[in-house]
């Protein structure tokens, strides 16, 4: 009986090793997606979006989505930027980038004339999670 238990246990994968391998694969994929920057932002957007689709649960996914939003803003695509920022808030609400994403989303909504949506977005800000510079930006946006 103990031999059976020993054989059964040896065939069960070690979840910690599996998670570590997935985390390392995600980190590598994220770094590879960034390789196109700064020379080819269009290619970087494609590669980062592909990364987020492959590794949506990665700790690097919110960083990739935030970078996608920044690139979309630079390339005059605010709708895509809003989509990626909303994705961070929906899929990674506890990410260190979540409040920064909320702030940027509110800012984009204001710029796009969506003042009610911006107000609703900015009201949810947790100021304690923002840097001092971001808190100043948030107060200025709310004053608008």
Image (cartoon, rainbow, N blue to C red):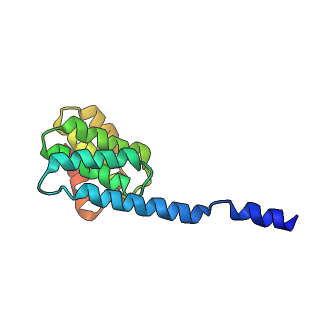
Q: Which quadrant would residue 50 be assigned to in this image? A: top left
- Give how far across and how far down residue 41 sits, in percent: 15, 50
Q: Which quadrant would residue 81 be assigned to in this image? A: top left
Q: Nearer the viewer, residue 52 or 78?
A: 52
Q: Which quadrant would residue 7 be assigned to in this image? A: bottom right
Q: Residue at x 30, y 34 (%)?
A: 117
Quadrant into which the N terminus falls: bottom right
Q: Residue at x 26, y 48 (%)?
A: 47
- Give how far across and how far down residue 101 sits, in percent: 30, 49
**Can I make out residue 103 in this image?**
no
Q: Residue at x 31, y 49 (%)?
A: 65
Q: Residue at x 22, y 44 (%)?
A: 107
Give above or below for 61 relative to 7.
above
Figure label count: 0
Q: Residue furthest right?
A: 1
Give above or below for 118 relative to 57.
above
Tell me if 21 is positioned left or right of 78 in this view.
right
Give above or below for 113 relative to 55.
above
- Give how far across and how far down residue 133 sits, in percent: 22, 62
Tell me if 45 is positioned left or right of 53 in this view.
left
Give above or below for 110 relative to 141.
above
- Give how far across and how far down residue 80 sits, in percent: 24, 38
Quadrant into which the C terminus falls: top left
**Can I make out residue 55 in this image?**
yes
């Amino acid at each position: 009986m103990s031999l059976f238990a020993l054989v059964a246990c040896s065939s069960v994968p070690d979840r910690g090793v599996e998670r570590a391998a997935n985390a390392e694969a995600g980190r590598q994929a994220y770094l590879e997606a960034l390789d196109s920057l700064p020379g080819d932002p269009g290619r970087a957007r494609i590669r980062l979006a592909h990364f987020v689709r492959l590794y949506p649960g990665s700790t690097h996914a919110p960083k990739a989505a935030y970078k996608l939003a920044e690139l979309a803003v630079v390339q005059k695509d605010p709708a895509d930027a809003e989509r990626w920022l909303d994705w961070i808030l929906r899929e990674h609400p506890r990410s260190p980038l979540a409040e920064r994403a909320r702030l940027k989303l509110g800012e984009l909504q204001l710029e796009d004339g969506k003042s009610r949506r911006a107000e609703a977005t900015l009201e949810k800000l947790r100021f304690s999670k923002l840097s001092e510079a971001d808190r100043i930006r948030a107060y200025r946006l709310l004053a608008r």
